[in-house]
Each structure stands twice: as C-alpha cells, then as structure tokens.
Image (tube, helix red, strand yellow):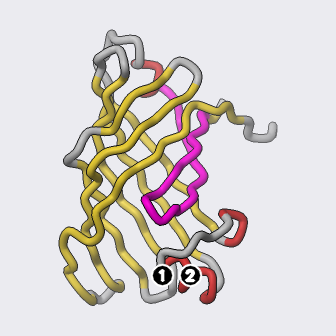
C-alpha cells in the first residue's frame, strides 16, 4: 500500500467570537457555540474572504479533547461562494491547554490540532474540484483566532 501524499491548498485564518452561546455541561462535556465573524484564505489558485455568519459547535469533552464542528461561507476574489464544513480535534498536555485557554501563544508542535474539511461549490464552476477530493488540515490557535493549513490528499 502506498503512503498518503498531500498538496498544499490554502492557509485559512478565521475570526471567531467566543462564545456566542454557552450551553454548559452536558453528558459529553462543556458545549459552546461560537460565531465565525470573518477571515481570509489564500493558496495557489484560491484566494478570498470568509463571510460573517458561520459557526463552530465546540465540545470540550470530559476527556480533555476539544471537538470542533464548523460551518462557514467563503467568497473567492473572483466572486464565487464556497460552503466549507469541517470536524476536528484539538488536545495537548494540561499546561499547554491552560495557556491556550488563557489566550497565550502556544507553539503548534505542543498540541494535536487536526481537521477534515469538506466543500460545496457550484457544480460547473472553477472551484468544483474542491468537491472531488479529501482534505485535511493542521491547526494553530492564535489569540485572534485559529489558522489552518489545508492540504488535498492526492
């Protein structure tokens, strides 16, 4: 079996308003809903902004893992809209996660932060290729919001 290979697609920077709604402790952990208020994305052949109105259904699980469930709308510089959704996991040593929660910078190598994005676009548009592949990303949580490096699995 061959090794998995990837190619870089874009860097995605999000602005997130935390929390929009704090549901509180459930049987699975602490549930919060954050609003994605904007952002930018750029890569080879793909550039634009993230529109206000997306959301992140966050679950800080009882085992210390943060589970992400994000939906957002991207608009390319040439006027096309792309719907993006991703699920992901973020976790690390307790002291690293405490620094992250306090808004302090944390080196991405100190924690596990991965997502699996999926895209919807116009079926005949220039970005339809996004709907025909599997994507993965690595995350970095900056004080102003998350930054993702998105890769297409070849």
With 125 as the anchor, is 67 left or right in this view? right
Determine which quarter of the picture holds residue 48: top left
- Residue 122 horizontal/vertical position (percent): 29, 18
Q: Residue 136 lies in magenta, yes or no? A: yes
Q: In this view, does 73 lie above or below 122?
A: below
Tell me the chief SS of the magenta region: strand
Residue range in magenta is: 132-152
Question: What residue is drawn where x is 60% and y is 38%?
Answer: 151
- Residue 148 horizontal/vertical position (percent): 53, 48
Question: What residue is drawn where x is 47% and y is 57%?
Answer: 146
Determine which quarter of the picture holds residue 75: top left
SS under mark 1: loop
Question: What residue is drawn where x is 51% and y is 54%?
Answer: 115
Residue that extends furthest to the right in the rendered view of this protein: 2
Mark 2, residue position: 99
Q: Residue 124 carries which label?
A: none
SS under mark 2: helix
- Residue 149 horizontal/vertical position (percent): 58, 44
Mark 1, residue position: 102
Asked if the residue at tag 2 contacts the one at tag 1, i.e. Cβ–Cβ closer than 8 Å, the answer is: yes
Q: How far apart are marks 1 and 2 (CA)?
A: 5 Å
Question: What residue is drawn where x is 56% and y is 28%?
Answer: 43
- Residue 39 horizontal/vertical position (percent): 37, 43
Other residues around mark 2 within 10 Å, as few (<14) / some (14–19) / many (≥20): few
Q: Residue 109 lies in magenta, yes or no? A: no
Which corner quadrant holds the C terminus?
A: top right
With 1 as the anchor, is 53 left or right in this view? left
Pick the residue in front: 106 or 86: 106
């Amino acid at each position: 079996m061959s090794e998995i290979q990837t190619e870089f697609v874009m860097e995605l920077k999000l602005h997130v308003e935390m929390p929009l709604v704090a549901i509180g402790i459930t049987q699975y952990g602490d549930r919060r809903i954050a609003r994605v208020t904007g952002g930018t994305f750029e890569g080879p052949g793909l550039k634009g902004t993230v529109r206000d109105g997306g959301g992140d259904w966050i679950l800080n699980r009882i085992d210390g893992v943060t589970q992400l469930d994000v939906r957002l709308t991207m608009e390319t510089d040439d006027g096309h809209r792309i719907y993006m959704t991703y699920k992901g996991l973020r976790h690390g040593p307790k002291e690293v996660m405490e620094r992250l929660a306090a808004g302090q910078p944390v080196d991405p190598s100190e924690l596990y932060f991965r997502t699996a994005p999926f895209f919807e676009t116009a079926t005949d548009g220039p970005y339809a290729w996004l709907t025909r592949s599997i994507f993965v990303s690595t995350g970095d949580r900056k004080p102003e919001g998350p930054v993702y490096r998105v890769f297409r699995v070849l």
